[in-house]
Image (cartoon, rainbow, N blue to C red):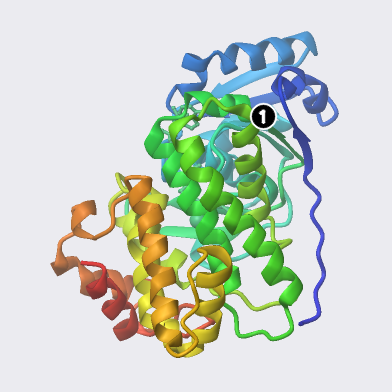
Amino acid sequence: MNNFVYYNPTKIIFGKDTQKNVGDEVKKYGKKVLLHYGGGSIKKSGLYDQVIKSLKDNDLEIFELGGVVPNPLLSLINEGIKMCQDNDIDFILAVGGGSVIDSAKAIGGGVKYNGDVWDFYAKGLTCTDSLPVGTILTLPATGTEMNFRSVITKDDTLEKRGASFPNPVFSILNAELCATLPKNQVANGLVDMLAHVFERYFTNTKNVELTDYQMEAVMKSIIELGPYVYDNPADYDKYAQIMWAGTVAHNYSLCVGRETDWATHQIEHELSGMDSSIAHGEGLAVLFPNWMKYVYKHDVDRFVQLAVRVFNVEEDFFDKEKTALKGIDALINFYKRLNMPLTLRDLNINEDKIDELALLATRNNTITQGNFVKLNTDDIKNILLLSR
Ligand code: NZQ
Ligand code: ZN
């Protein structure tokens, strides 16, 4: 196990009706709040009215910026930065999914930065000074509600990149708000949270049994409860567990003391950057089984462990590879149960894009991706070819 420092300053307020008191939290940080949201789901569900009421009850001055799209764009972020600066706004409340929250983090950082906020993304830098951001999460998926990451797309070049910002100061998690989620977004979220565990589970660090077991519990919960919430998103008691699984999967508590991978995420960001109609979860469902098939021989035992402990595959003691591959098949079946796309063709990405995607992922052969196995441009091309 490696040395580590773990610090997570996000206050989590979890449970039914908790969004109704959001104003009590916001007023601790200021008087003028930017309410940031997406394409209108919060208005349809009634959440918007509840939030406005609580903010008004607490005498907060409200400024609004809606219109965040999935795979959020730098142009709207720049609009938000200007709005905050022009009006001396002192708090940002993000109400929505990962795209809204990531956009809010970028606005918060951009307000305090004397330059183009894209600098942080272009160079993969860490922004340490930001307006405080609070969130009401409506889509369990990304884990952004309790972490320091933000992933956005630059409108003109379609580069999709991540950077680090201060964590949200609080996040309100009420699984009642998931009842209105369309099935495909429930599924995208399940695939994403499971992928966040995979990115940590596949490691070369030894003596990490404790966090292996913790991750296996999270993965089993997603696999067992996931299909149920896909069919019944209004079941609070089940979705509450999935919601917390999504947060834990990416709040960096599960990977303490170990090296992590992230190659599949990096390749996926090129896909949903190139075509913003592709949801992050969809790209991951296409890529993860093929990344696994490409790298499993590097540490067959770890793939056997996943297959047996998480997917309940019966171990073939004479043929480890067979057991490992059965685990990958079980993952594909899980994705099928959620009606996820499984090939690049399903995403309408033609084979002639493969070379370009691979080069984008390695920034024209200047970097490799991943740590479990370091992937160069040819490796990534091979994974994309397996994904056709
Ligand atoms: O925009 P609205 O109208 O709100 O509708 C959204 C959007 O169309 C809808 N939605 C959200 N909650 C809803 C709802 N519809 C009905 N009822 C609700 N309760 O869902 C659609 C998708 O929303 P989005 O925020 O884009 O989805 P998600 O939460 O999956 O976020 C995806 C983004 O996060 C990034 C992804 O790359 C992608 O850009 N990620 C961020 C990470 C992070 N910051 O740590 C890590 C991830 O790996 C990921 O890269
Ligand atoms: Zn993800």
What is the quadrant of residue 135 in the picture?
A: top right
In the figure, 111 relative to 192: above or below? above
Q: Is residue 363 visible?
A: no
What is the quadrant of residue 343 in the picture?
A: bottom left
Q: Is residue 385 visible?
A: yes
For label 1, being within 8 Å of ligand 1 is answered: no
The N terminus sits in image quarter: bottom right
In the figure, 373 relative to 331: above or below? below
In this rendering, would 156 be left or right of 35?
left
In this rendering, would 284 be left or right of 350?
right
In this rendering, would 47 be left or right of 25?
left
Camera-side residue: 360 or 216?
216
Q: Position of residue 217 (x, y in %)?
A: 66, 58
Which residue shows up at 55% across the image and 80% down it?
302
Camera-side residue: 295 or 57?
295
Which residue shows up at 58% across the image and 38% down it?
81
In the figure, 44 relative to 369: above or below? above
Q: Position of residue 376 (x, y in %)?
A: 38, 85
Which residue shows up at 67% across the image and 33% down it?
92
Q: Position of residue 18 (x, y in %)?
A: 74, 23
Q: How many numbered marks does the figure carry?
A: 1
Residue type at numbered disc 1: Asn
Which residue shows up at 20% across the image and 67% down it?
388
Q: Please rate how many residues cluster around mark 1, counting C-alpha atoms within 10 Å: few if below 14, some from 14 to 19, many from 20.
A: many
In this rendering, would 170 be left or right of 304?
right
Q: Position of residue 161 (x, y in %)?
A: 47, 60
Mark 1 secondary-structure assignment: loop
Camera-side residue: 204 or 336?
336
In the figure, 268 relative to 99: above or below? below
Q: Residue furthest right?
A: 28
Residue topped by disc 1: 174
Camera-side residue: 352 or 226?
226
